[in-house]
Image: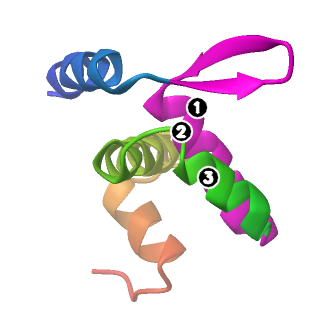
């Protein structure tokens, strides 16, 4: 299932790449770069970086990228903790164990 989601994500990423002037060169940003920059800026409370990352891709693509990042983070933590992804997700959200 994750393979299929990843393939769809790659297709979406290819379709929504944008360019942004970065000083002396044009550099394309994809939705995964935007999602990583956006989430890290949110964690740090840096509104300027949040706004910058939000402009790299469409809102829909950014949402997809943030969702994919969240899924990968939960899976990685679950493996690290030797727990189920459900248990980890509920713990991260402060929900009681199911």
Q: Nearer the viewer, mark 2 or mark 3?
A: 2
When asked about the image quadrant of residue 75, the answer is top left
What is the distance, in whole Å, between disc 2 and disc 3 at their CAs? 10 Å
Screen quadrant of the N terminus: top left
What is the distance, in whole Å, between disc 1 and disc 3 at their CAs? 8 Å
Residue 20: image x %, image y %? 62, 27
Q: Which residue is mark 1?
A: 33
Identify which residue is drawn at 67% across, 66% down: 42
Q: Earlier in the sequence, mark 1 or mark 3?
A: 1
Q: Earlier in the sequence, mark 2 or mark 3?
A: 3
Screen quadrant of the C terminus: bottom left
Does dot 3 land on a helix, a strand or a loop? helix
The reply, left or right, for residue 37 in relation to residue 94 is right
The reply, left or right, for residue 60 in relation to residue 22 is left
Q: Which residue is mark 2?
A: 56
Does dot 1 land on a helix, a strand or a loop? helix
Does 98 sit above or below residue 67? below
Identify which residue is drawn at 77% across, 10% down: 25
Q: Which mark is residue 68?
A: none
Residue 16: image x %, image y %? 33, 27
The reply, left or right, for residue 17 in relation to residue 47 is left
Q: Is residue 39 magenta?
A: yes
Region of the chain picked out in magenta, as a range: 19-45
Identify which residue is drawn at 56% across, 39% down: 34
Disc 3 residue crowd, few under 14, some 14–19, many 20+, Cα 10 Å: many
- Furthest residue toward right: 24
What is the distance, in whole Å, between disc 1 and disc 2 at their CAs? 9 Å
Q: Which residue is mark 3?
A: 38
Q: Nearer the viewer, residue 92 or 35?
A: 35
Residue 64: image x %, image y %? 32, 45
């Amino acid at each position: 299932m994750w393979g299929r989601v990843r393939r769809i994500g790659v297709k979406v990423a290819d379709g929504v790449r944008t360019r942004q002037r970065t000083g002396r060169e044009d550099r394309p940003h994809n939705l995964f770069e935007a999602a990583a920059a956006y989430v890290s800026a949110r964690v740090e409370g840096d509104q300027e970086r949040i706004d910058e990352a939000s402009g790299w891709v469409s809102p829909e693509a950014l949402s997809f990228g943030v969702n994919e990042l969240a899924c990968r983070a939960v899976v990685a933590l679950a493996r690290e903790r030797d727990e189920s992804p459900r248990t980890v997700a509920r713990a991260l959200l402060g929900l009681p164990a199911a």
